[in-house]
Amino acid sequence: MLKLYDANISGNCYKIKVLLSFLNVEYEIIDFDLFKRQHKSAEFIALNEFGQIPVLVDGNETIRDSQAILFYLASKYDDGAWLPKDALGQAKVIQWLSVAANEIFNSFAMARVYHLLNRTEIDPCRV
């Protein structure tokens, strides 16, 4: 069974849970408390050297980064509805994943980090 290392307040984790729901894929949640910085523990760093959630474990495979996880899930469990099979369709999906990783992260997500986690630094690696 898939394992999703998750934090309830994370938008990146939420979008993975939404896609898993759309794909009807069963998974187990391993919940992390970002306020206690559990994602910076040595055990978690062994899964993701950047100390960031989400992380997806599928058998012996470990995938970090929400965009990579979304792409992996759609590639493995989808019939083409969420990830087109043609090159242009895939490029358009990746364009939007890049928007989520850059423009959205560096605006709305950082504001959430500031207000929810009381982090004043703008270093996404320290979130």
Image (spheres, rainbow, N blue to C red):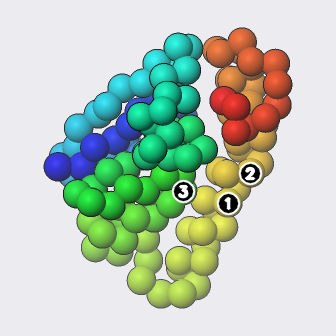
Say whether residue 64 is left or right of residue 113: left
Residue 67: mark = 3
Residue 98: mark = 1
Disc 3 from disc 2: Cα separation: 11 Å
Which residue lies at the image location 48% right of the left edge and 23% below the top edge? 38
Say whether residue 65 is left or right of residue 24: right
Secondary structure under badge 1? helix
Secondary structure under badge 3? helix
Residue type, label 3: Gln
Asked if disc 2 and disc 1 are in contact, CB closer than 8 Å, the reply is yes
Asked if disc 3 and disc 2 are in contact, CB closer than 8 Å, the reply is no
Residue type, label 2: Asn
Which residue lies at the image location 27% right of the left edge and 60% below the top edge? 60
Disc 2 from disc 1: Cα separation: 6 Å
The picture places residue 104, in percent across and down from the top left corner, at 71, 44
Residue type, label 1: Ser
The picture places residue 12, in percent across and down from the top left corner, at 53, 40
Q: According to the image, label 2 marks what residue?
A: 102
Say whether residue 109 is left or right of residue 45: right
Query: Which image quarter: residue 58?
Result: bottom left
Secondary structure under badge 2? helix
Label 2: how many residues lie within 10 Å, few (<14), some (14-19) or many (20+)?
Answer: few
Can residue 81 be seen?
Answer: no
Which residue lies at the image location 79% right of the left edge and 35% below the top edge? 123
Number of labelled discs?
3
Q: Nearer the viewer, residue 1 or 93?
A: 1
